[in-house]
Amino acid sequence: MNASKILQQLMQQAGGSSNNKKGSSGTMDVKGILEGLSKQLGGNEGQKGQSGKASSEGGFDMKSLLGGSAMGLLVGSRRGRKLGGKALKYGAIAGVGMLAWKAWQNSQASASNEAAEGKPVESLSGSTQERRSLELLQAMIMAARADGHIDAREQELITQQIDALGADQELHAWVEHQLKAPLDAQALAREADSPQAAREIYLMSVAVIDEKNPMERAWLEQLASALKLEPGMVDELERQALAAG
């Protein structure tokens, strides 16, 4: 499968930049992604037209802004959510690994073994990057489905958009399965290969979910329990998601 390729493109969509390239170290240019996000959100605020239609609430139609992309579908543009209500979450998707790592650092009252925590997804490579990418894609899809409102047509659209990003046949089949499989927080938590992976899975879920929706909030609570995240860490991860914008 080529999950890492697809996840990187989704992160770049979230960051508002399709031209971010890897640095000389081989890791993703998170700074560039986040700078692209800032330009996208700042440049479109208060405008009408092709870049996004102004809503009655002063927000923007996210589907118009993102062109019906896989990212737009997964974060819920199909349900009429407005950019003004979701803008703060895009930064969390764009820099999920670094932000989850920062949340861990902020929560530490004393020195701890960093090596045992695992590495951020942005600094992984090879098979470990592929595995983490699958974990995060699974988290994203499950979170998008948490309110039970993705119908068969929307499942097809999401699959088509991910295919358009270059998904291979194996990943295509995997995505189709994830869109139909029962939601299972325990199963998702078992995929986490390190404490860092658990934090990234939760942060990615927070980024996609509308915390005001009772079903989606309940999913987050189930996931936090399954991932065995301490309440303080949950609060810090949610704070990082909000601050990322």
Image (tube, grey):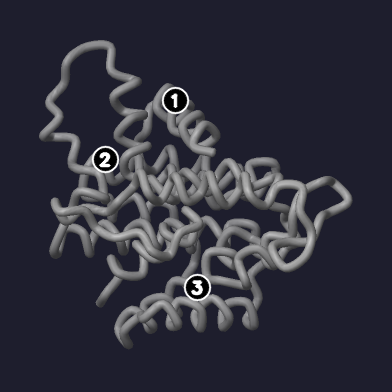
What residue is at 37 percent from the left and 49 percent from the top? 32
Kindly identify which residue carries mark 2: 196
Percent position of residue 60, x then y? 74, 55
What residue is at 36 percent from the left and 63 percent from the top? 7
Q: Tell me the CA gap for discs 1 and 2.
A: 16 Å
Q: Tell me the CA gap for discs 2 and 3.
A: 25 Å
Percent position of residue 91, x then y? 48, 44
Instruction: Please identify, in this view, whether the residue under mark 1 or under mark 2 is nearer the observer.
Output: 2
Kindly identify which residue carries mark 1: 231
Percent position of residue 154, x then y? 63, 77
Disc on res. 179: 3
Count residues near mark 2 (Cα–Cα under 10 Å), then give few for <14, some for 14-19, many for 20+.
many
Q: Quadrant of residue 5?
A: bottom left
Give whichever of 134, 67 is nearer the camera: 67
Where is the N terminus found, in terms of image quarters?
Answer: bottom left
Residue at disc 3, secondary structure: helix
What residue is at 39 percent from the left and 66 percent from the top? 9
Give whichever of 18, 176 is nearer the camera: 18
Where is the C terminus found, in terms of image quarters?
Answer: top right
